[in-house]
Image (tube, coloured by chain):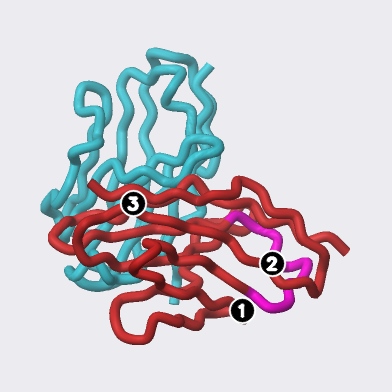
């Protein structure tokens, strides 16, 4: 089966510019996650969707970050405007069911964002 | 609130030697525990997970981990490592009653010939 797809793989932007990342989860997976992984740290959850509803977005900087999951399938994560500290790898993951505490998460390859 | 500490940021080891990667967590409620591996330029993939039952969990690629509730630990072990095991390993915890999984900072395993 196809894995989690993400694009682009790499992005370099100037601070104060906007950027968007796209994620296509594994077919049939109800839950979708966006994580931020700063160099030398573990992934930090930004937002979690169950189908097209938000389960948790408590660590999403809502003044500059937004995310949507239309029709409960693909998702986009946007940063507007970007700051230097947003430089990180943005990981998308999906899991099959709605028992998210115990489900296995399947991760995409990530998008490496560099903000200059 | 839960937290995860991976005690070693880097672990160098010779091929065919045993290895242990340490993970401690803090939580006052029941937990579910995971180890993920990240190979260079790839996404994370699940090695193993503890949900309930036997405290010794076996995973893929010959790895195993033991849940120790009294010491709040979930250390990952492999009796004999290969060059191909070189990767970053993340311990993660989900807390009963919560919604999300918390990841540790990772341990980079270097296997030398």
- Image position of A71 with respect to B56: above or below: above
- Provide the residue designation for mark 1: B61
Q: CA distance from mark 3 to mark 1?
A: 24 Å
Can you tell which chain is drawn red?
B
For mark 2, give the secondary structure: helix
Q: Quadrant of residue A72?
A: bottom left
Single out the residue that lies furthest toward the bottom: B54
As for residue B34 lying within the magenta part, the answer is no
Residue at left offset 42%, top offset 63%: B73
Marks 2 & 1, CB-CB < 8 Å contact = yes
Q: Quadrant of residue B57?
A: bottom left
- Provide the residue designation for mark 3: B102
Q: Is residue B39 left or right of residue A111?
A: right
Q: CA distance from mark 3 to mark 2?
A: 23 Å
Q: Colour of chain A?
A: cyan
Single out the residue that lies furthest toward the right: B113
Q: Nearer the viewer, residue B74 or B51?
A: B74
- Image position of A42 with respect to B56: above or below: above
Q: Residues at marks 3 and 2, common chain?
A: yes
């Amino acid at each position: 089966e196809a894995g989690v797809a993400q694009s682009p793989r790499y992005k370099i932007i100037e601070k104060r510019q906007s950027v968007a990342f796209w994620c296509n989860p594994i077919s049939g997976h109800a839950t979708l996650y966006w994580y931020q992984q700063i160099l030398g740290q573990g992934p930090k959850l930004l937002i979690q969707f169950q189908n097209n509803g938000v389960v948790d977005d408590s660590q999403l900087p809502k003044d500059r970050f937004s995310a949507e999951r239309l029709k409960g399938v693909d998702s986009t994560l946007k940063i507007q405007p970007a700051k230097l500290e947003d430089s990180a790898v943005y990981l998308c993951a999906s899991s099959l069911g709605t028992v998210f505490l115990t489900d296995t998460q399947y991760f995409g390859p990530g998008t490496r964002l560099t903000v200059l | 609130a839960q937290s995860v500490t991976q005690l070693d940021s880097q672990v160098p080891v010779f091929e065919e030697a045993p290895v242990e990667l340490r993970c401690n967590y803090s939580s006052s409620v029941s937990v579910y525990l995971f180890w993920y591996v990240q190979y260079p330029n790839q996404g994370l993939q699940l090695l193993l997970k503890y949900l309930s039952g036997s405290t010794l969990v076996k995973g893929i690629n010959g790895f195993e981990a033991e849940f120790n509730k009294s010491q709040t630990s979930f250390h990952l072990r492999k009796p004999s490592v290969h060059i191909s095991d070189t990767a970053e390993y993340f311990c993660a915890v989900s807390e009963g009653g919560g919604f999300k999984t918390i990841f540790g900072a990772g341990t980079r395993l270097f296997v030398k010939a």
